[in-house]
Image (cartoon, rainbow, N blue to C red):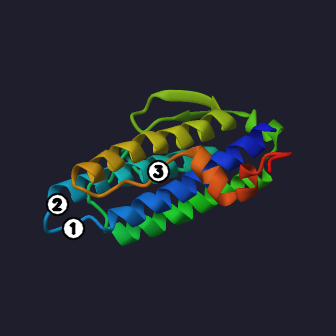
């Protein structure tokens, strides 16, 4: 499997997992769990902001945010739509990038001003793993509030989106 194909699979999983988590977060009662819901939205917003920062770095564009979160907390519905759009951008990029392009090194600056240099593939891998880490934190908040978090597993996503993977050659 090529690096591009592997990253495509990770970002398809990311889009699915982001959607599942934010959909489940809607079921968290704002009146009963106001602080927990706010914290979960702030964490999800941080994921989105970092996704947008790396999107800009990959395009060699101006950074859209001055930090790794926004001063204001967005409404959950608006955040969900914004994350869907950003996830879609990453998925589209991986449809057109080849392994050579993914190996390109990009010099950039983080929002704190520190210099950085990563390949496109490393930047994409960072975005995928960063989101996974923070989805786990939101899932923990949901569980503490009595809401079963979605199962954020690559294996589960692959088998749900490609059920033929459950079939073994020669199996009865």
**Residue at (13%, 64%) from the top-left corner?**
32
86 or 40, nearer to the observer: 40
Instruction: Mark 3 vs mark 1: give the one in front.
Output: 3
Dividing the picture into quadrants, the one containing residue 2 is top right
Q: Quadrant of the N terminus?
A: top right
Which residue is farthest right?
A: 170
Q: Label 3 belongs to which residue? A: 151
Q: Is residue 170 visible?
A: yes
Q: Characterize the local packing of mark 2: few (<14), some (14-19) or many (20 or more) Cα atoms within 10 angstroms.
A: some
Q: Is residue 17 left or right of residue 24?
A: right
- Percent of width and height locating residue 84: 52, 64
Q: Label 1 belongs to which residue? A: 29
Q: Is residue 55 above or below residue 161?
A: above
- Percent of width and height locating residue 151: 46, 50
Q: Is residue 84 above or below residue 9?
A: below
**Residue at (33%, 68%) from the top-left corner?**
26
Q: Does the residue at mark 1 contact the one at mark 2 (Cβ under 8 Å)?
A: yes
- Percent of width and height locating residue 23: 41, 66
Q: Earlier in the sequence, mark 3 or mark 2?
A: 2
How far apart marks 1 and 2 lie (CA) works out to 6 Å
Q: Does the residue at mark 3 contact the one at mark 2 (Cβ under 8 Å)?
A: no
Q: How many marks?
A: 3
Q: Is residue 98 left or right of residue 70?
A: right
How far apart marks 3 and 2 lie (CA) works out to 22 Å
Q: Label 2 belongs to which residue? A: 33
Q: Is residue 35 left or right of residue 82?
A: left
How far apart marks 3 and 1 lie (CA) works out to 20 Å
Q: Characterize the local packing of mark 1: few (<14), some (14-19) or many (20 or more) Cα atoms within 10 angstroms.
A: few
Q: Is residue 7 above or below residue 160?
A: above
**Residue at (32%, 54%) from the top-left corner?**
70
Instruction: Mark 3 vs mark 2: give the one in front.
Output: 3
81 or 153, nearer to the observer: 153
């Amino acid at each position: 499997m090529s690096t591009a194909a592997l990253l495509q699979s990770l970002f398809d999983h990311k889009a699915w997992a982001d959607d599942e988590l934010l959909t489940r977060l809607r079921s968290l009662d704002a009146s009963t769990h106001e602080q927990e819901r706010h914290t979960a939205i702030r964490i999800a917003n941080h994921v989105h902001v970092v996704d947008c920062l790396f999107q800009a770095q990959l395009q060699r564009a101006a950074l859209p945010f001055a930090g790794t979160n926004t001063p204001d907390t967005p409404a959950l519905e608006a955040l969900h739509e914004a994350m869907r759009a950003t996830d879609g951008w990453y998925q589209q990029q991986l449809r057109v990038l080849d392994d050579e392009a993914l190996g390109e090194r990009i010099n950039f600056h983080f929002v704190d001003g520190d210099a950085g240099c990563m390949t496109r593939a490393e930047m994409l891998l960072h975005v995928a793993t960063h989101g996974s880490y923070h989805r786990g934190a939101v899932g923990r908040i949901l569980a503490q509030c009595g809401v079963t978090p979605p199962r954020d597993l690559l294996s589960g996503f692959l088998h749900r989106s490609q059920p033929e993977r459950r079939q073994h050659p020669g199996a009865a």
